[in-house]
Amino acid sequence: MVTLQSRKLVAPTENLRDQVAHALRAALIAGEIKPGGVYSAPALAAEFGVSPTPVREAMLDLSREGLVEVVRNKGFRVTEMTERDLDEYTEIRTLIEVPTVGKVVRTATRDQLEALRPEAEAIVAAARAHDLTGYLDADRRFHLDLLALGGNRHLVSVVGDLRKRSRLYGLTELDEAGVLVDSAEEHVTLLDLMIAQDAEAAEALMRHHLEHVRTLWASRPQPEQHTALTLGRG
């Protein structure tokens, strides 16, 4: 049996399906549900204190993001990420995000860039507080809002999808190793370079940042091998 940490599904601005999906992503980040494991909707519903229907709906949303896959008559298997997958996602993000940063430096106003500072500082604060869900939420907002200043909504959508697929399941180990704060602080430095209109340095830092994140993942402690299991109540 795998027990999830208590998570209140009471956000008034989200429907139950979205709240469950958010809670499941948090459980993935925290390592409470594991890549390769098979989990049933009724058992997860019992953990969250809801009916199985919103859990199934949320799992189908996650399957469209590539985070889980349907296992007939059993539930959902959490997708395992390969080193090749991560290399390819990083390559695509580098091809998109590095030149977009240069474009934004040349076209965005100082006020537009300064508006991103609370998000950059929130990433650092979350890393220092060991708030992994908050870290990823703030990181996602910063990167996507920064790219949005380039004016191409389809580009933002593509990067958003890549970020979901390459979510760091082993973030807990990286946090415990004390390596997240340095990566978090790169966001503030990037913003300062962009406000200073140093496009070349900003592009170089964005490339370094994406490579840094990939390197952190490669150097994480490797999880023990395990067989797929079905989450049950006993």
Image (cartoon, rainbow, N blue to C red):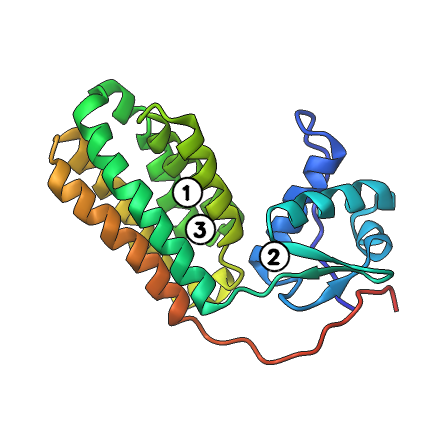
Please give the label number shown on residue 118.
Answer: none
Give the camera-side residue of 150 and 215. Answer: 150
User: Helix, strand or loop at disc 3?
Assistant: loop
Measure how far apart labels 1 and 2 are at the Cα level: 17 Å
| Residue 54 percent coordinates (x, y) | 80, 40
Q: Is 197 on the left-hand or right-hand side of 51?
A: left
Crowdedness near tag 1: few (<14), some (14–19) or many (≥20) residues, C-alpha within 10 Å: many
| Residue 115 percent coordinates (x, y) | 32, 24
Residue at image location 67% in from the left, 49% down from the top: 63
C-beta proximity under 8 Å, tags 3 and 2: no
* Residue labelled with disc 2: 28
Measure how far apart labels 3 and 1 are at the Cα level: 14 Å
User: Helix, strand or loop at disc 2?
Assistant: helix
* Residue labelled with disc 1: 139
Give the amino acid at mark 1: Asp
The residue most toward the bottom is 225
Please give the label number shown on residue 129.
Answer: 3
- Image quadrant occupied by the N terminus: bottom right
Residue at image location 34% in from the left, 23% down from the top: 151
Measure how far apart labels 3 and 2 are at the Cα level: 19 Å
Give the amino acid at mark 3: Ala
Give the amino acid at mark 2: Leu
| Residue 126 percent coordinates (x, y) | 43, 46
Crowdedness near tag 3: few (<14), some (14–19) or many (≥20) residues, C-alpha within 10 Å: few
Residue at image location 69% in from the left, 38% down from the top: 19
Residue 102 found in image quarter: top left
User: Helix, strand or loop at disc 1?
Assistant: helix
- Sequence-wise, the earlier of marks 3 and 2 is 2
